């Protein structure tokens, strides 16, 4: 029997609806990523379903709340754009109602308000529709909230790689320990280290400009992170994201544009040096980019034939240089 079948079998009709917040409902379940991460995610889903069953047994109920009284989590986990009335989730709730409740806690700092553990997209949809929000109110610590938030994303529409990296980075910057972050992302130490490396290396301005980039995986994001360590490449990327055409692309295409930019062979910076004769009457500026050389002469009236002298002896100079190379 699969884990999902096992979970379905242990719930009554009422509790099954609530447990489905991590398994079904608006948005299809999509699991991706390394196999070891999938196993961890399924284990955490089992645990969350068990906790939800215990919560219902302890008397927690589904209540209706004013969406204006509900704040988002203190850690953002998605890079979604603005939701519109044509969004699939909005039309689904408008037609069928809110089938799955969200999970909230009483706001720890603002009296009379609530804070979402999971169900952010459903909350946004219901705000657009100007409808009350069906929710379960549970007492939770910060650790429990972010773990619940992460579990929902593993069980439903997966976060993209950069969303997972940004979520991990945000949790660490808020002081959460590695064990809590691993639970929230259903991952292990090795993968978490890579996620945090990308989060710390790729500037937030670039991440925001690209967006979720759902098709871009770990390898390509790490390639970008490695290459923008070069200040010249980072500068080129920052210029790219400011171009009008870049904003018009979808998120995956924006990512590919940046990947192409960092993969472009960078031209060496031109170098220049100045030569002066012992009398100071003649100066030469020599510029090179490694393949092309430009020689500019500036002479006084008495030395104005020096340029022609060099030009007339190019064959002789080249033969002399070639003989020295052979030697």
Image (cartoon, grey):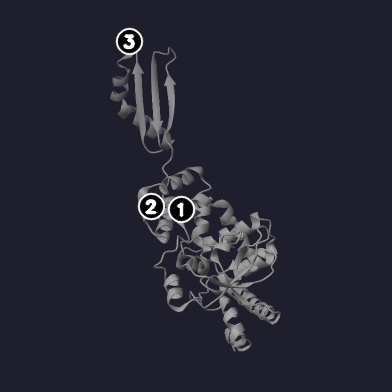
For the residue labelled by badge 1, is the local secondary structure a helix, a strand or a loop? Answer: helix
Spatial CA span between label 2 and label 3? 57 Å
| Residue 142 falls in image quadrant | bottom right
| Residue 167 falls in image quadrant | bottom right
**What residue is drawn where x is 50% and y is 56%?**
223
Residue 60 % position (x, y) = 67, 77
**What residue is drawn where x is 64% and y is 75%?**
44
Spatial CA span between label 2 and label 1? 9 Å
* Residue at which label 2 appears: 246
Residue 284 % position (x, y) = 39, 22
* Residue at which label 1 appears: 209
Q: In the figure, 285 relative to 28: above or below?
A: above
Residue nearest the viewer, comparing 290 with 12: 12
Residue nearest the viewer, comparing 154 with 24: 24
For the residue labelled by badge 2, is the local secondary structure a helix, a strand or a loop? Answer: helix
Density class for disc 2 (Cα within 10 Å; few <14, some 14-19, many ≥20) is some
Residue 316 % position (x, y) = 33, 27
Q: Earlier in the sequence, mark 3 or mark 1?
A: 1
Which mark, residue 302?
3
Q: Can see residue 34? A: no
Which mark, residue 15?
none
Q: Can see residue 234? A: yes
Density class for disc 3 (Cα within 10 Å; few <14, some 14-19, many ≥20) is few
Q: Are marks 2 and 1 in contact (CB under 8 Å)?
A: yes
């Amino acid at each position: 029997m699969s884990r999902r079948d096992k979970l379905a079998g242990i719930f009554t009709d009422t509790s099954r609806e609530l447990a489905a917040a991590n398994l079904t409902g608006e948005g299809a379940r999509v699991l991706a990523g390394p196999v070891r991460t999938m196993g961890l995610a399924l284990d955490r889903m089992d645990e969350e379903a068990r906790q939800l069953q215990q919560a219902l047994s302890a008397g927690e109920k589904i209540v209706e709340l004013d969406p204006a009284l509900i704040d988002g989590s203190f850690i953002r986990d998605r890079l979604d754009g603005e939701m519109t009335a044509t969004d699939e989730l909005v039309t689904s709730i408008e037609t069928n109602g809110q089938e799955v409740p969200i999970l909230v806690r009483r706001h720890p700092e603002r009296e009379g308000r609530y804070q979402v553990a999971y169900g952010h997209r459903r909350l946004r949809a219901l705000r657009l529709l100007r409808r009350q929000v069906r929710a379960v109110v549970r007492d939770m610590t910060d650790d429990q909230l972010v773990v619940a938030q992460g579990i929902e994303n593993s069980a439903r529409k997966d976060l993209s790689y950069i969303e997972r990296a940004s979520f991990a980075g945000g949790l660490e910057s808020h002081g959460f320990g590695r064990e809590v972050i691993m639970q929230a992302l259903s991952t292990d130490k090795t993968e978490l280290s890579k996620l945090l490396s990308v989060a710390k290396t790729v500037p937030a301005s670039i991440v925001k400009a690209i967006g979720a980039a759902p098709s871009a995986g770990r390898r390509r994001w790490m390639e970008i992170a490695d290459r923008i360590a070069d200040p010249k490449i980072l500068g080129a990327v920052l210029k790219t994201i400011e171009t009008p055409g870049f904003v018009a692309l979808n998120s995956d295409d924006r990512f590919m544009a940046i990947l192409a930019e960092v993969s472009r062979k960078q031209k060496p910076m031109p170098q220049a040096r100045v030569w002066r004769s012992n009398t100071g009457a003649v100066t030469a500026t020599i510029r090179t980019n490694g393949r092309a050389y430009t020689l500019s002469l500036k002479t006084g009236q008495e030395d104005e034939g020096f340029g022609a002298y060099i030009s007339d002896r190019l064959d002789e100079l080249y033969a002399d240089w070639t003989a020295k190379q052979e030697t």
